[in-house]
Every structure is written in structure tokens, then in C-alpha cells.
């Protein structure tokens, strides 16, 4: 690692802890301290860290195997699948825990897309096109359901923009699930370093490369589903964080795995802080804040270091 | 090309048809306005309603021409009303049909006085002025009676529309006006908007005495944990319909809020 990279990591860790501190203690009312910390702030922080990390890592996996900077975690039709699950749970079950339906919807869609892409004749292009088709198909059904249920349309639209209020889940379960997934991911990380190069040079044949491609698509789908479980459908994080990490820290996936966790978490923690405090007590939907906060940074780095993306 | 010209010709014929201009026929795409129409006894001129117009029961027998966001244009042209009556929510739909010479009438319901004004306006429009004056007088008497029911005034009320995201009522909401009229205090009345999404912490720090959960909003465990000292009331569909609509039945909402202090 170069001195510059070490300094950048130290800065990133520092940024992460500042965001964490702000989200925990900024304007904390002393009279209701325990109530607010245990029921609102700590669960939100856990969800922000898990959701941000999952999206950033999933984005990195898909951008690397597809060798396409525009690939995002919802590539496999996950957003529409999750959205469909959420809408169904609100309409049919008037459900509080719609995030579990989102999670199930995302998982089912992802595996359907992977299955349709075919294991023996698997190709990334086929996967993207099938994911896109399913996205459009399910998206149309979601729009129809929203229009046909005007009583709940506003609520559904708001929920679909994502946010940490969306789930009421056991933090312990979520943390265990997240750590287990991270461990599995870290086992396969060295292979991802190989996949970013020309597959013909590294693997004996295309099917050997495809085996790993499928593993990483499944892992990305699972990570994204965990994120949906925590925070609903949050766009943009899964594109911007892997690209930003690459711009700042280079191409080594082992390092990027770590920096993506920090960057994704920090972005969501900071966006959550802005969304709850900038026009307090009113809240801005998280999805909107992420784009407003993230895009200027991203464009700045893109203009400054955009050349690296060609490598 | 000739098919296109023929279609244009037929559309032109439909629009310029003189029988199109029927005297005082209208459709309502607002449940509130439908209720007012029935209350001033001018329903014979009402030619169509929406799926949301569920009160009074007879309103359900009228032809259904759509909902808040969608109107069946073919049905609309078959009915040929003079006016489309809409409220703030559905105003943008109503304005679309001006092209067929159907006049949109968009009524705003911002507070209690605006309800009286709109009832009188609809009375004038439908030549039922006397009926509308009687209805307004009757409602005013009922409101006076409802207010007197509050034996424990100044209760701090938190009205929750949805818990996820946490959405409530602001200063410009009609419900805030109702709570104030009932003699209680809406803890979110200082928020200068209609239906804001707010920080849960803000609501906790305001220590509400009573929490009202809208019908659509689930009574989840977290609310009882977050507000251990508050009384939580979940509304029924019927109560929710009355409170959500600035209709002639709004005095019942005042009765509801005025009696919150009773155990």
C-alpha cells in the first residue's frame, strides 16, 4: 500500500466515526435519552452500516464481473422484486413488517433471473437483459397496483423511496446475518481479483469463469436483499461507492472490499443525519438525500481522477 | 392517414355536439363533495362518482367513472356533464377535461369556514340555495353542541397518519383545525405544512397525552414502547372516513376529539 492510500484510509475511518458520533449524539434530548438511543438511534445506525456496506460490496461485485461501471446491485431485477413484495404486503396484509416481504421478493426475483440466465450457458449480458425485462414487467405491475389503490398510493410511494423506518427487525439477527455473509464474501474475494482481468488468460475455459461469476451474482443478490430488509430500495449507493473507492484506492479488490464497507456506511450515516436534522423536525426521504449528498462528491472525484476507470 | 382524419372528425363531432351541454349535470370526483351534494339534496343532478365515494350508501348506486387519479374518458363523454367537481387532491384530473368543454370546479377545504363556504357555493350552483343555508345552520348548531362535550380540555394530541414513515398533521391540515376546535392541542400544529413526515424524536419530546392512529396505520408494539405514558387510540374505518373528510359530518370529528379526555 502506498502512503497516499494509508492516509486516505485513515481519513475514511475518521469520517466514519464522525458520522457515527453525529448520528448517535447530535441534539440528543437528555430526558428521553435511553428511549431515543435504544429504540431509534442505535437501530438506525446498525441498519445504516449494514445497508450501506451491503450495497457498496454488491455493487463492487457486479461492476467487477460485468466489467461495467454502470452495473448496480439492482441489476438482477431486485428492486422491482423487492418493490412488488412491499406493495403486496401493504395491500393484502396491511403489514408493518413489509421489509420481510421486500427481502423475500428480492431473493425470489434474483434467483429467478439467475435461473433463467442458465447455469451452463450463463453470460453476464443475458443476465442483465433478463434482469432488465423482469424489472420492467414487475415495475408495470407495481405502477398499476399503486394507481388502483389511491388510498394507499402516497404511503406506498414514500415507502418505495427507502428509509430506515421501514423495518422492525431484530438487530441481533441482522448483525449475525450480515457478519456471516461478509465472511463468505471474504473467502471469495481473491477470485474476484482474478475475474477483473481477462477471463481467457486466467481461467482454463469460460465455464470455470462462469462458475465464479454465478457465485458473485448470488452473493450480490443476497447482500442487496439484506439491504432491502434494512432500508427498503435505496438507489445510487451501489453505483457510487464502488466507483468512488476505485477512484481513490485503485484496483485491488482486497483493499476495495474494506473501503467499500467504510464508504457505504459513512454515506448512509451522513445521509441519515442530514435527512433527520436539516429541516428538523421534518424529515426528507433518505433516497433523495443520498443522491443530493453523493452526486456532487462523485462528480468532483470523477472530474479529478476519472482516467483510472479506464483501467 | 385517412383513419386518423376520420378519428379526428368523430372526436370533433362529439365535442361540438349541442346535446353535450345538459343543464346542470355534474360528476363528483371527491368523496367530500359527493357527501355535500347529498346533504343539500341535489343528487338528481349528480351523474357520476368515484370508487372512493362511499357515503351516503345511495352514492354507491351512481355510475362510477373512475377514482382520484383516473377517469374513464369514454364514460365521461357518454354522461356529458357540465361540470366536474373536485377537491385539492383531484383538481389536477378535473382540469384535464376542459378540452371537452366540461368546466372543472375545484373546491379547497382548508378549514371549517371553507366547508361552510363550499356548501353555500354548491347550493348556489345547483339552485338549492335554501337547502344549503339550512344545512350550514344545522351544522353550526351541532358544532356548538360538540364543543361543549369537552370536559377535560387542552389535552396534547398526536395524530399519526402512518408510522412508516412517521407522518402526521401540520398547521395547514384540516384535522389540526378540528382538534383545536374541539378544545384540545395538536402537538404538531406549529409545523407549517399539511401532512409532514417528521422525526419520531420530536414527537417523543413533546410528550403527548393521547395518540390517535389513523385507520390505515398499524398499531405496532413500538408505538406503545416509545410513548409509554400516552393513551393510544386506533380509529375504525368509519371514524377515519369522517375525520379525513371535510364533509358536512365533520361535527362528528369534533365530538370524537372533544371526548378524548373521557376514560
Image (cartoon, helix red, strand yellow):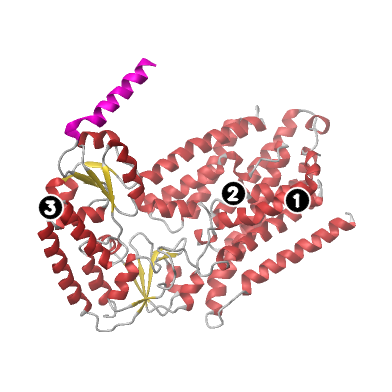
Q: Where, quadrant-wise, is the C terminus of chain B in this rendering?
A: bottom left
- Is label 1 in contact with label 3 (beta carbons under 8 Å)? no
**Residue B87 visible (yes or no):** yes
Lateral position of residue B223 relative to residue A176, left or right: left
Task: Give the labeled residue for mark 2.
Answer: A235
Res. A301 mark: 1
Query: Where are the magenta residues, as a range?
Result: B1-20
Is A231 left, or right, of B1 in this rendering? right
Counting from the top left corner in percent of width and height, residue B64 is at 23, 42
Element under disc 1: helix
| In this rendering, position of residue B82 left or right of residue A17 | left
Would you identify the image quadrant in which residue B15 lies?
A: top left
Q: Residues within 10 Å of mark 2 (few under 14, many from 20)?
A: some
Give the Cα distance between marks 1 and 3: 68 Å
Closer to viewer: mark 1 or mark 3: 3
Residue on which the image places disc 3: B127
Q: Nearer the viewer, residue A121 or B231?
A: B231
Amino acid at each position: 500500500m502506498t502512503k497516499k492510500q494509508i492516509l486516505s484510509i485513515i481519513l475514511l475511518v475518521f469520517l466514519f466515526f464522525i458520522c457515527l458520533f453525529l448520528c448517535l449524539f447530535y441534539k440528543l434530548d437528555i430526558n428521553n435519552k435511553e428511549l431515543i438511543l435504544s429504540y431509534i438511534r442505535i437501530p438506525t445506525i446498525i441498519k445504516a452500516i449494514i445497508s450501506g456496506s451491503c450495497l457498496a460490496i454488491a455493487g463492487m461485485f457486479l461492476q467487477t464481473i460485468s466489467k461495467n461501471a454502470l452495473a448496480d446491485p439492482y441489476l438482477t431485477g431486485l428492486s422491482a422484486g423487492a418493490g412488488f413484495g412491499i406493495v403486496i404486503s401493504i395491500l393484502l396484509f396491511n403489514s408493518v413488517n413489509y421489509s420481510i416481504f421486500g427481502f423475500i421478493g428480492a431473493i425470489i426475483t434474483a434467483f429467478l433471473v439467475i435461473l433463467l440466465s442458465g447455469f451452463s450457458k450463463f453470460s453476464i449480458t443475458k443476465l442483465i437483459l433478463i434482469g432488465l425485462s423482469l424489472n420492467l414487467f414487475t415495475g408495470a405491475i407495481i405502477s398499476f397496483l399503486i394507481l388502483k389503490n389511491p388510498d394507499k398510493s402516497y404511503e406506498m410511494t414514500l415507502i418505495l423511496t427507502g428509509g430506515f423506518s421501514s423495518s422492525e427487525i431484530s438487530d441481533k439477527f441482522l448483525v449475525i446475518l450480515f457478519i456471516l455473509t461478509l465472511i463468505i464474501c471474504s473467502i471469495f474475494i481473491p477470485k474476484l481479483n482474478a475475474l477483473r482481468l481477462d477471463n481467457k488468460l486466467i481461467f482454463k475455459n469460460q465455464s470455470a469463469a462462469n462458475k465464479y461469476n454465478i457465485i458473485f451474482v448470488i452473493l450480490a443478490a443476497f447482500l442487496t436483499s439484506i439491504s432491502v430488509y434494512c432500508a427498503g430500495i435505496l438507489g445510487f449507493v451501489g453505483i457510487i461507492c464502488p466507483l468512488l473507492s476505485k477512484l481513490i484506492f485503485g484496483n485491488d479488490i482486497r483493499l476495495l472490499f474494506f473501503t467499500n464497507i467504510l464508504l457505504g456506511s459513512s454515506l448512509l450515516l451522513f445521509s441519515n443525519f442530514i435527512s433527520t436534522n436539516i429541516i428538523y423536525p421534518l424529515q426528507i426521504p433518505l433516497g433523495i438525500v443520498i443522491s443530493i449528498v453523493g452526486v456532487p462528491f462523485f462528480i468532483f472525484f470523477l472530474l479529478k481522477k476519472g482516467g483510472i476507470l479506464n483501467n | 392517414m385517412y383513419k386518423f382524419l376520420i378519428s379526428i372528425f368523430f372526436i370533433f363531432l362529439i365535442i361540438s355536439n349541442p346535446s353535450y351541454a345538459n343543464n346542470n349535470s355534474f360528476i363528483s370526483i371527491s368523496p367530500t363533495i359527493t357527501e355535500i351534494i347529498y346533504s343539500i339534496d341535489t343528487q338528481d343532478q349528480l351523474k357520476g362518482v368515484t370508487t372512493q365515494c362511499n357515503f351516503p350508501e345511495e352514492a354507491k348506486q351512481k355510475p362510477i367513472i373512475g377514482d382520484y387519479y383516473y377517469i374513464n374518458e369514454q364514460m365521461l363523454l357518454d354522461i356529458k356533464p357540465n361540470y366536474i367537481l373536485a377537491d385539492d387532491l383531484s383538481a389536477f384530473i378535473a382540469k384535464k377535461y376542459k378540452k371537452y368543454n366540461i368546466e372543472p370546479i375545484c373546491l379547497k377545504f382548508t378549514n371549517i369556514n371553507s366547508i361552510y363556504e363550499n356548501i353555500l357555493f354548491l347550493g348556489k350552483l345547483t339552485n338549492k340555495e335554501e337547502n344549503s343555508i339550512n344545512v350550514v345552520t344545522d351544522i353550526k348548531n351541532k358544532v356548538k353542541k360538540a364543543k361543549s362535550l369537552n370536559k377535560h380540555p387542552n389535552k396534547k394530541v398526536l395524530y399519526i397518519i402512518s408510522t412508516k414513515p412517521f407522518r402526521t398533521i401540520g398547521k395547514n391540515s384540516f384535522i389540526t383545525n378540528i382538534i383545536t376546535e374541539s378544545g384540545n392541542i395538536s402537538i404538531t400544529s406549529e409545523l407549517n405544512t399539511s401532512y409532514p413526515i417528521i422525526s419520531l424524536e420530536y414527537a417523543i419530546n413533546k410528550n403527548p397525552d393521547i395518540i390517535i392512529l389513523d385507520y390505515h396505520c398499524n398499531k405496532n408494539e413500538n408505538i406503545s414502547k416509545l410513548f409509554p405514558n400516552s393513551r393510544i387510540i386506533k380509529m375504525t374505518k368509519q371514524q377515519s372516513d369522517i375525520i379525513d373528510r371535510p364533509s358536512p359530518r365533520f361535527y362528528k370529528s369534533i365530538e370524537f376529539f372533544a371526548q378524548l379526555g373521557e376514560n
